[in-house]
Amino acid sequence: MGNFELDSRKPFIISGPCSAETEEQTLETCRRLAATGLVDVLRAGVWKPRTNPGSFEGVGLKGLAWMSAAKAETGLPIAVEVATSKHVESALEFGVDVLWIGARTTVSPFAIQDIADALRGNKDIVVLIKNPMNPDLALWAGAIARLENVGVDIKNIGLIHRGFSYFGHSKYRNAPMWHLVLEMRSRFPEMAMICDPSHICGTRQYLQEVSQAAADMRYDGLIIESHICPDKALSDAAQQVTPDGLEELVKGIRWRADSTDDPEFAKALSVFRSEIDQIDSEVFDLLSRRMKVAEQIGRVKRDNNVAILQGGRWTSIVEKVVAQAQKLDLSEDFLKTVLEAIHIESINRQNKVMNS
């Protein structure tokens, strides 16, 4: 499996600067991370896909040389992001052990195929695929299939959860949408799933809680950005931590066991799961009744030649429910997500009635 085995250690930690900026910054960051004894793979971006032209777009090939030197000095494997076949070829020439495909690239089947063609027949390289920016699991799964089709060993393919872009307000830079990742894990249970708290959070403030959430959901590891002087970083300064900060963060995570043989645990779990099953049954029964009412509303609108959407009505419903978030002990993001799903289904039901 090459110099680095994807399943060699769990949890495994990938860390390094968002961008390789200078030789000194890159090497010193990698030295300090290696000294913690907690990092399994060193990472750095050398080609940076930026939203706006003119932003810092990476140092290119000389960054690969710096990472290669870090590998030689620390003995740790190295990882870089690739977005084109040329990137792949250059990374392999410099002895990169792990390639990751960014979210902006995963959304493009053409770009994924270009990378896959450059890896045709390569059974040693490890490839990690970030989720696409938009919540589309088919694109994520399609990237896996394209790599498999050119001979990349399935054991060498892993997934990175970096959150999803969406319209709306959230405390996170990219919404975790944990339920989508759990679905992806159920489809590919044999694949390592790594969480990228840096890109989910967009700020150091929430890194610990997101990292712990990932650990609680049995992720296989984390990829976290680290910089010797984060506030002066040329890209994503707010979400990077110092090597000392990385050490403190990782040591503060509690990685729990998959299960236990304690009979009291099994008994308590069975009781609570039965309670959840009963509540779920009641919740979905209520939702079914709600949708029947929505259909009746659709018939009234149809019979009176009134449009489905009524200005301000749904906004007032959302505001009323979200205002109870604290009282209900539920997050606003959760309530909005549930309400959005209910709204979509209600519209679909009314639309069906209107056209019957």
Image (cartoon, helix red, strand yellow):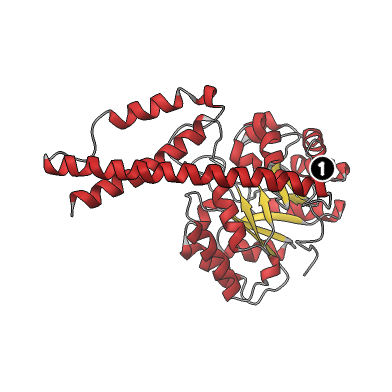
Q: Position of residue 217 (x, y in %)?
A: 68, 47
Front residue of 280/328: it is: 280
Q: How many marks?
A: 1
Q: Residue at x 19, y 44 (%)?
A: 299
What type is the residue that disc 1 sits on?
Leu
Front residue of 319/112: it is: 319
Q: Is residue 349 left or right of residue 113?
A: left
- Image: 125 above or below 240: below
- The answer to whether one can see residue 12 in this image is yes
Q: Quadrant of the N terminus?
A: bottom right
Q: Is residue 81 left or right of residue 135?
A: right
Q: Residues within 10 Å of mark 1 (few under 14, many from 20)?
A: many
Q: Position of residue 245 (x, y in %)?
A: 78, 33
Q: Residue at x 43, y 45 (%)?
A: 285
- The answer to whether one can see residue 165 in this image is no
Q: Is residue 312 left or right of residue 335?
A: left
- SS class of the residue under badge 1? helix
Q: Quadrant of the C terminus?
A: bottom left
Task: Report the residue marked by disc 1.
Answer: 33
Q: Residue at x 47, y 31 (%)?
A: 169
Q: Position of residue 220 (x, y in %)?
A: 73, 53
State which quadrant residue 186 falls in: bottom right
